[in-house]
């Protein structure tokens, strides 16, 4: 009834001037001649000739527009009702008698539903109405087939060969090139921030040891990093503290950088991710270069916690992480491998006039996924009729929940919301689109809507396990195959988030790009673990747990490195030189292999904090002040003699 009332209201609205030609759907003549428009008497007449009369005046009235599919023609069962409405209202089918809204007469024999307004808005309404006419009820036969998956074999692309260690799979992504870039940019950043200051430059070996310490710290669950170097026995971690000093660890953490700030463009709309751009580009290319996705993939969002100030920070009260950066992610539904991602930095240009969900999906689907007929699963934020059409055009199927008020959904499916309370649990309704996809409505606790091009159009029912009564008893509830597949394969991104959250290395930071970097670092470790598990499965090796994989990875990254080691003269030669002269001589300890300042032992006894590069070579290189204010060198040896 609501649909018929809507048609009645449309029938009384005038036709836009520029669309008069399009509203001629058929001519009553049996000869099948086309209609022509005579500008002299402004009457449509069947004629074999082209448009006649004053061409300029006709061009001013309308533009040519092919609307073969956009005609909204009344069905035969609605004609009798339309005639009754015309007799009651005493108007023509367009509600204007024999004259149009501009005073001219129109000989229109087609039975069509006009739309109000003109210009672009009228064209949009015509397209929407034509789209609705493409839906067919469930009982009508429609044949569209779903192609089999034609992509390459899923999994790691390269040859495993001798890759047996955890670090071998980590090096796939964090290779020598990206490590060298981080080292160069970190040293450059400190030089730019502290001009004229001498410092010990970061090296690749030291950076790898730093990453290993970070992974090991996350595995142990240390909340306060300073406790690693604490003198309290239950806080102190001798193994980690022996790798580098606390001062050096925090120096690297504070100066870690990835791009040159002096080359940042001064454009009105700059790249908001400029500080991370080399890391983002490298990692996305590495993720896609070394792995083939399986048949089922999923797109969802991930939140990176950040409470500082930044224009790209998002707020979503429905998420566990309510404030932070939103990362759109494409992942494998079977393994959780992250294949592609984009960091959302807020609104940006919308040249194709599509909604955000459409643009996000198109931005994540790379060219090498075209025509492989993957099954993509996404939630109602992304799913829409234009998206399914566009994905099917490039050889990809889509299945997902959809909002009931999305444009393009069939009326018979949308109107089920008014009778949802009367529907039994497990009831399903289906409507088919002639372009090769379906719309489902399934009643669980509430009515849920689906759009799917990954299913052939029939309604095979399967079952899901649900709580069926107030006593907590569980049983089977019938549901469409599209619903079952959605519940089965939608969790690819959630699986990746789950693996990453177990031993997250993310640390609180005022620098926004560091929060995103540690998120990418965690994702990289998780992807390496997934590939490592695949190698174990192929070689029938017992699988390694995630915590042990991270432990071995941290151990292999740290290796035997220690910035506390002497890098100068061997200890045996030093002892021979010291023993040869039995005098206490103050020396610069940097020549003896100590590359950082150490606390003076005399000042430490006096509860003072002074650091120095100098010390006594004969007294086991003990650090001692040597200046005109504090004579710690002399005082130390006087006290020792006494």
Image (cartoon, rainbow, N blue to C red):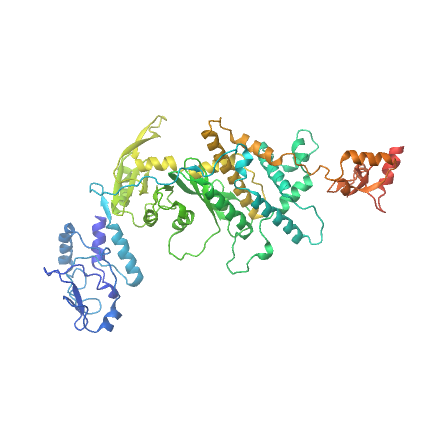
User: Residue 557, image x and y in percent?
Assistant: 60, 36
Q: Residue at x 45, y 29 (%)?
A: 537
Seen in the image, is 343 located left or right of residue 387? Answer: right
User: Residue 93, image x and y in percent?
Assistant: 17, 59
Image label count: 0
Q: Quadrant of residue 26?
A: bottom left
Seen in the image, is 3 located left or right of residue 589? Answer: left
Examine the rendering and report whether any part of residue 445 can be seen: no
Examine the rendering and report whether any part of residue 472 can be seen: yes
| Residue located farthest toward the right when viewing the structure as drawn | 642
Q: Quadrant of residue 604?
A: top right
Q: Residue at x 49, y 28 (%)?
A: 543
Seen in the image, is 154 located left or right of residue 148? Answer: right
Q: Could you tell me which quadrant the C terminus lies in?
A: top right
Q: Residue at x 60, y 33 (%)?
A: 555
User: Residue 355, image x and y in percent?
Assistant: 38, 52
Q: Residue at x 85, y 40 (%)?
A: 585
Q: Quadrant of residue 457?
A: top left
Seen in the image, is 225 located left or right of residue 431? Answer: right
| Residue located farthest toward the left when viewing the structure as drawn | 30
Q: Camera-side residue: 126 or 87?
A: 126
Q: Camera-side residue: 520 or 122?
A: 520
Q: Camera-side residue: 373 or 86?
A: 373
């Amino acid at each position: 009834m609501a649909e018929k009332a809507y048609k009645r209201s449309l029938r009384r609205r005038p036709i836009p001037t520029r669309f008069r030609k399009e509203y001629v759907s058929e001519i009553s003549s049996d000869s099948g001649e086309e209609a022509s428009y005579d500008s002299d008497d402004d009457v449509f007449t069947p004629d074999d000739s082209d448009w006649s009369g004053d061409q300029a005046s006709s061009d001013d009235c309308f533009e040519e527009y092919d609307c073969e599919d956009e005609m909204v023609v009344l069905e035969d069962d609605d004609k009798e009702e339309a005639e009754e409405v015309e007799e009651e209202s005493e108007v023509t089918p367009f509600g204007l008698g024999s004259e149009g809204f501009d005073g001219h007469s129109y000989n229109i024999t087609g039975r069509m539903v006009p739309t109000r307004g003109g210009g672009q808005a009228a064209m949009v309404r015509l397209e929407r109405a034509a789209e609705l006419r493409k839906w067919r009820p469930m009982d009508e036969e429609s044949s569209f087939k779903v192609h089999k998956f034609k992509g390459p074999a899923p999994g790691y692309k390269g040859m495993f060969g001798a890759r047996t260690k955890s670090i071998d799979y980590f090096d796939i992504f964090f290779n020598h090139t990206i490590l060298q870039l981080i080292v160069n940019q970190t040293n450059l950043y400190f030089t730019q921030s502290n001009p004229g200051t001498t410092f010990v430059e970061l090296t690749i070996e030291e950076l790898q040891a730093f990453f290993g310490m970070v992974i090991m710290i996350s595995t142990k669950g240390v909340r306060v990093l300073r406790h690693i170097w604490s003198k309290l026995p239950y806080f102190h971690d001798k193994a980690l503290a022996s790798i580098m000093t606390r001062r050096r660890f925090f120096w690297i953490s504070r100066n870690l950088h990835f791009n040159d700030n002096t080359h940042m463009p001064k454009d009105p709309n700059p790249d908001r991710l400029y500080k991370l751009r080399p890391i983002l580009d490298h990692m996305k290319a590495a993720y896609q270069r070394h792995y083939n996705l399986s048949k089922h993939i999923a797109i969802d969002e991930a939140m990176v916690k950040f409470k500082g100030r930044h224009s790209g920070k998002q707020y979503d009260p429905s998420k566990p992480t309510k404030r932070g950066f939103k990362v759109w992610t494409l992942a494998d539904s079977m393994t959780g491998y992250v294949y592609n991602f984009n960091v959302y930095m807020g609104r940006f240009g919308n040249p194709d006039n599509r909604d955000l969900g459409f643009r996000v999906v198109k931005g994540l689907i790379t060219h090498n996924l075209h025509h492989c007929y993957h099954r993509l699963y996404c939630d109602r934020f992304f799913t829409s009729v234009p998206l399914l059409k566009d994905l099917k055009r490039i050889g990809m199927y889509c299945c997902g929940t959809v909002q009931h008020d999305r444009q393009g959904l069939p009326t018979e499916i949308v109107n089920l919301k008014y009778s949802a309370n009367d529907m039994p649990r497990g009831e399903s309704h289906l409507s088919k689109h002639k372009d090769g996809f379906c719309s489902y409505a399934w009643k669980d606790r509430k009515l849920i809507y689906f759009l799917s091009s990954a299913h052939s159009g029939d309604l095979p029912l399967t079952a899901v396990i649900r709580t069926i009564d107030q006593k907590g008893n569980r049983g089977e509830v019938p549901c469409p195959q599209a619903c079952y597949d959605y519940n089965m394969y939608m969790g690819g991104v959630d699986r990746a988030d789950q693996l990453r959250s177990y031993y997250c290395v993310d640390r609180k930071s005022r620098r926004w790009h560091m929060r995103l970097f540690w998120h990418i670092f965690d994702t990289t470790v998780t992807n390496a673990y997934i590939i490592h598990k695949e190698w174990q499965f192929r070689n029938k090796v017992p699988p390694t747990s995630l915590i042990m994989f991270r432990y071995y990875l941290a151990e292999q990254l740290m290796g035997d490195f220690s910035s506390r080691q002497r890098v100068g003269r061997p200890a045996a030669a030093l002892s021979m030189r010291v023993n040869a002269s039995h005098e206490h001589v103050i020396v610069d300890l940097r020549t003896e292999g100590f590359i950082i300042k150490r606390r003076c032992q005399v000042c430490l006894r006096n509860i003072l904090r002074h650091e120095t590069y100098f010390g006594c070579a004969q007294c086991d290189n003990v650090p001692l002040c040597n200046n005109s204010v504090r004579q710690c060198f002399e005082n130390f040896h006087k006290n020792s003699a006494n």
